[in-house]
Amino acid sequence: AQSVTQPDIHITVSEGASLELRCNYSYGATPYLFWYVQSPGQGLQLLLKYFSGDTLVQGIKGFEAEFKRSQSSFNLRKPSVHWSDAAEYFCAVAMEYGNKLVFGAGTILRVKS
Amino acid sequence: DAGVIQSPRHEVTEMGQEVTLRCKPISGHDYLFWYRQTMMRGLELLIYFNNNVPIDDSGMPEDRFSAKMPNASFSTLKIQPSEPRDSAVYFCASSLAGGVTDTQYFGPGTRLTVL
């Protein structure tokens, strides 16, 4: 069965600094990979997704993620963090012909001014 | 577009009571998903529907949980009887055509507290 690991429970970065959130997956075939963001008291919003093709994926709000098959990773990055980016971020993986998303435990991002 | 609507936003009940959570998906979306989010287990899929028909309920924790979708614009998740360990945030999500290639849109969630 597929699984997702987000090694960092909390991350704190300064406003304007770069950000990288880690995600590792376990899945035998080609995975479908996602990053979602959850602001306090809100539902999840899709930031970006990867199915195939270019391994560097651009998303909303200035985020990008890079798929590295050799490392089974799909890390999320942003060159300059804004205070409004403070939220919880979830990586998710899915099977190619399914409907189920398997989510990681999430990483809480704090932004200090 | 109003997005996915869930009600109530907060529910506090006592152990043994029946709880009903409600969801209105985005109009025109054929798939509806119910998720549960807890500190211990994270975000997990409970059940999903396609065109009002339950497709996979393998995530439903036990018989105390049931979900229905009587029409394309309404779904309920019922817990009877409720227990303290059911305390969680329950999310409803919908997607247009299903399959993981289609974006799931999440509602704001219902925070359930069972005393």
Image (cartoon, rainbow, N blue to C red):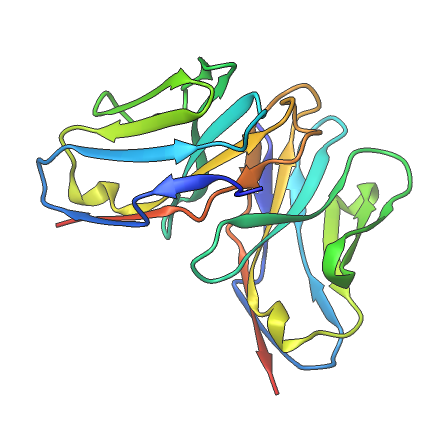
| Residue A19 located left or right of residue B56 | right
Name which residue lies at 40% across and 26% down. B74
Q: In this view, which residue lies farthest toward the right?
A: A54
Location of residue B97 with respect to A37 vertically, above or below: above
Tell me where residue A111 sits by quadrant.
bottom right
Q: In this view, which residue lies farthest toward the front?
A: B1
Name which residue lies at 55% across and 64% down. A87
Give the x, y percent position of residue B66.
Answer: 28, 22
Location of residue B115 with respect to A108 vertically, above or below: above
Q: What is the count of numbered marks? A: 0
Give the x, y percent position of residue A112.
Answer: 59, 84
| Residue A24 located left or right of residue B93 | right
| Residue A66 located left or right of residue A104 | right
Most foreground residue, A52 or B108: B108
Name which residue lies at 59% across and 36% down. B104
Give the x, y percent position of residue B28.
Answer: 59, 24
Quarter of the figure that contains the C terminus of chain A: bottom right
Most foreground residue, A113 or A1: A113
Quarter of the figure that contains the N terminus of chain A: top right
Most foreground residue, B6 or B92: B6
Location of residue B20 with respect to A11 vertically, above or below: above
Location of residue B63 with respect to A5 vertically, above or below: above
Most foreground residue, A75 or A64: A64
Give the x, y percent position of residue B29.
Answer: 58, 25
